Image (cartoon, rainbow, N blue to C red):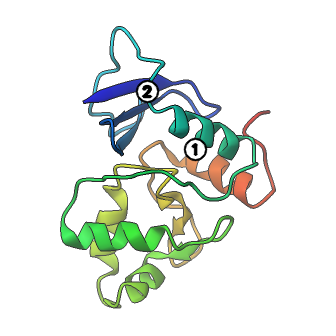
Amino acid sequence: MLCRELDTPIGPLLLVGDAHALQRIDFVHGRRATITPPSSPRDDVFVDVVSQLAEYFEGRRRTFKLSLAPAGTSFQQRVWRALLDIAYGQTISYGELAERIGQPTASRAVGLANGSNPIPIVIPCHRVIGANGRLTGYGGGLPIKQRLLALEQGTGSLLD
């Protein structure tokens, strides 16, 4: 397992994977932080991930072109693939996401799968909101979700 801690405008992130693919992005200070950052960081791994995340945070990247290997059930994988189809700057509800995967009555299960997305930002789970238009939980906290959506919708900057 390779790890690299990355300072970003939304706080430190821990990139985890192997030589072939990114498997996790953890918010170091988030509610789901599961891996302790390495005591001796590796700056020579995940160069493409670091570069593409920097471009995203600067507002210059709308999609990621990375090799991803999130671990999850087949249902979770379907939900996460569907998240990749939500356009930059757009939001949808859990119900809409459930419909997109062909299971319109599974919005709660979709919500659970969305909440266990191991590669936030790159797999854009922050683009899913409540049916009433309100922001719902996010692994990095609602203020970060709000900042990511503001960046994408052109109403805010992460570099302020």
Instruction: Residue type at mark 2: give it.
Output: Val
Q: Which residue is mark 1?
A: 144
Residue 68 pos. (x, y %)? 38, 52
The disc label shown at residue 87, or none: none
Which residue is most to the left? 73
Q: Assess whether mark 2 and mark 1 are in contact (beta carbons under 8 angstroms).
A: no
Please name the amino acid that badge 1 sits on: Ile
| Of 160 and 23, the residue lying toward us | 23
Judge from the rendering whether residue 45 lies leftward or rightward of residue 10; answer left or right: left
Name the residue located 75 percent from the left edge and 49 percent from the top edge: 60
Residue drawn at the location 52% of the way across and 50% of the way down: 121
Instruction: Mark 1 or mark 2: name the one nearer the start of the chain.
Output: 2
On screen, 153 above or below 58? below
**Residue at 43% of width from left, 29% of height from top?**
29
Mark whose residue sits in front, 1 or 2: 2
Kindly report the distance in space between the C-alpha atoms of the residues bearing marks 1 and 2.
Answer: 25 Å
Secondary structure state at the residue bearing disc 2: loop
Quadrant of image for the N terminus: top left
Q: Is residue 66 left or right of residue 111?
A: right
The C terminus, quarter of image: top right
**Which residue carries the number 2 mark?**
45
- Depicted 94 relative to depicted 5: above or below: below
Camera-nearest residue between 129 and 90: 90
Q: Residue at the location (56% across, 72% down)?
A: 86
Q: In the depicted view, which residue is nearer to us: 138 or 35?
A: 35
Number of other residues with Cα within 10 Å of mark 1, as a class: few under 14, some 14 to 19, many 20 or more: some
- Quadrant in the picture for residue 54: top right
